[in-house]
Image (cartoon, rainbow, N blue to C red):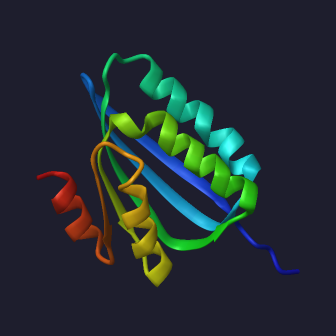
Amino acid sequence: MNVRKHGLSIGIQRTENNFFLTLKAVGKLTHADYETITPMIDSALGVVEDPKVRVLIDGTELDGWELRAAWDDFKLGLKHGNEFEKVAIIGNKNWQELGAKIASWFISGEAKYFEDEAAALSWLNE
């Protein structure tokens, strides 16, 4: 039997108004994945006035989104876009680099693509 894994893992660290959010995306993301993860992000950021968020997204095992999940991702970016200072996307596919450029249009901070986790973390901590 062939089992295809998909989903999002999330980690949130907070120091006063500063957040470090880590996401690991695996497989092809679904609307159900976002129904699980979005309330967690909303809850964590909703308790702080004017949160400052730095995000590390590991997309090395990401195969893409279902159409409705892509819409969910877009809505999440619009809702919290003003809170994101930096978003580092680690990937290994050409479309992920394009995705980082497009993401930067919808957030107030910067989004950048990396193929190396150490370089991504260094940039986030600058």
| Residue 20 quadrant | top left
- The quadrant of the rendering that contains the N terminus is bottom right
Q: Residue at x 49, y 40 (%)?
A: 78
Determine the residue located farthest toward the right in the rendered image.
Answer: 1
Q: Nearer the viewer, residue 21 or 88?
A: 88
Where's residue 74, x and y in %?
56, 49
Where's residue 55, x and y in %?
35, 49
Examine the rendered structure and indicate whether residue 84 appears above or below residue 101.
above
Determine the residue located farthest toward the front in the rendered image.
Answer: 105
Where's residue 77, x and y in %?
49, 44
Q: Residue at x 36, y 35 (%)?
A: 82
Examine the rendered structure and indicate whether residue 55 appears above or below residue 44.
below
| Residue 85 quadrant | top left
Residue 93 visible somewhere in the drawing: no
| Residue 47 quadrant | top left
Examine the rendered structure and indicate whether residue 96 appears above or below residue 44.
below
Residue 100 visible somewhere in the drawing: yes
Examine the rendered structure and indicate whether residue 47 appears above or below residue 53.
above
Where's residue 116, x and y in %?
29, 75
Q: Residue at x 46, y 73 (%)?
A: 96
Total marks shown come to 0
Q: Nearer the viewer, residue 115 or 65?
A: 65
Q: Residue at x 37, y 66 (%)?
A: 101
